[in-house]
Amino acid sequence: MQVHDGYCERIGTEPNLWGEPVNALTNLAFYAAVYWLFLEARKRERLDSGVVSLIFLVFCIGTGSFLFHTFATNWALASDVIPIQAFIILYFGVVLYHVHGLGLLVSIVGAFTFLPLAAGMQFLLAGTLLGGANAGYVSALLLLFVNAVILAIRHHAIAPWLAAGSGVFVLSLAFRILDEHVCGAFPTGTHFAWHILNSVVLAIVATGFIRHGHRRHGQAAADSGKR
């Protein structure tokens, strides 16, 4: 059985359920984000399919990351990576549709451009600190920041939330990259901070969408007329 031990805290290369106790337990931060987002969505009467799906994916991210940092096998890696990619695609899809007011098909296609963008960034950043698995997160950060700028120019209320999410994401990514470079001095590493700060990022951007992601009725009516 292949065990992934790419983090400072991982103890040994044999299957070890608690080989990364701090990395595993800090995934509780994602469950805290789920609880916060559910309360926020209920208060704002935004328990629609898009919002509920985003909240569910945050739960899956926390669960998948916990499984990966305990079992550290290939199937656990899939349970970690897939929900993250799904959240990124869904989030940008609902932002394109509800916030930018684009059509449904355009929003879906636009959201899935994350995948070739991430692949391209992985090629461009190969051999750098931002290469490898980090390239996908750099792509997500870039999309988040670009949307924040565009929506700030349009004076949309969600823009500060995306900007704040981008700022925390930069710090979060820095801790992820730093992890493998501090092993000698700090065996626990810094990956646990990536979990905590990422849960904050997800809470910020999802809260922004819950509060300010309403599609205007005029836009919805126009879309209906086009179909």
Image (cartoon, grey):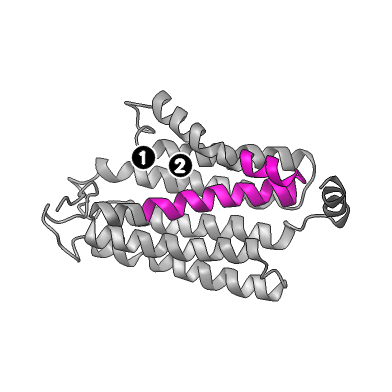
Q: Distance between the residues labelled 2 and 1?
A: 7 Å
Left or right of 189: which side holds 35? right
Q: What residue type is labelled 2?
A: Tyr
At 20% across and 52% down in the image, what residue appears?
A: 187
Disc 1 crowd rating (10 Å Cα; few below 14, some 14-19, many 20+) is few
The numbered dot on residue 137 is 2
Q: Which residue lies furthest to the front in this view?
A: 227
Left or right of 163: which side holds 184? left
Q: How many labels does the image show?
A: 2
Mark 1: which secondary structure? loop
Picture quadrant where residue 221 is located: bottom right
- On whether residue 156 falls in the magenta region, the answer is no
Left or right of 199: which side holds 93? right
Q: Which amino acid does label 1 sit on?
A: Ala
Mark 2: which secondary structure? helix
The numbered dot on residue 133 is 1
Q: Do the residues labelled 2 and 1 touch (CB within 8 Å)?
A: yes
The numbered dot on residue 176 is none
Left or right of 15: which side holds 172? right
- On whether residue 106 falls in the magenta region, the answer is yes
Q: Position of residue 81 (x, y in %)?
A: 39, 50
Q: Where is residue 219 in the image (x, y as percent from the top left)?
A: 84, 50
Q: Position of residue 49 (x, y in %)?
A: 64, 65
Magenta residue span: 80-109
At 31% across and 52% down in the image, what residue appears?
A: 77
Q: Where is residue 172 in the image (x, y as percent from the top left)?
A: 44, 48
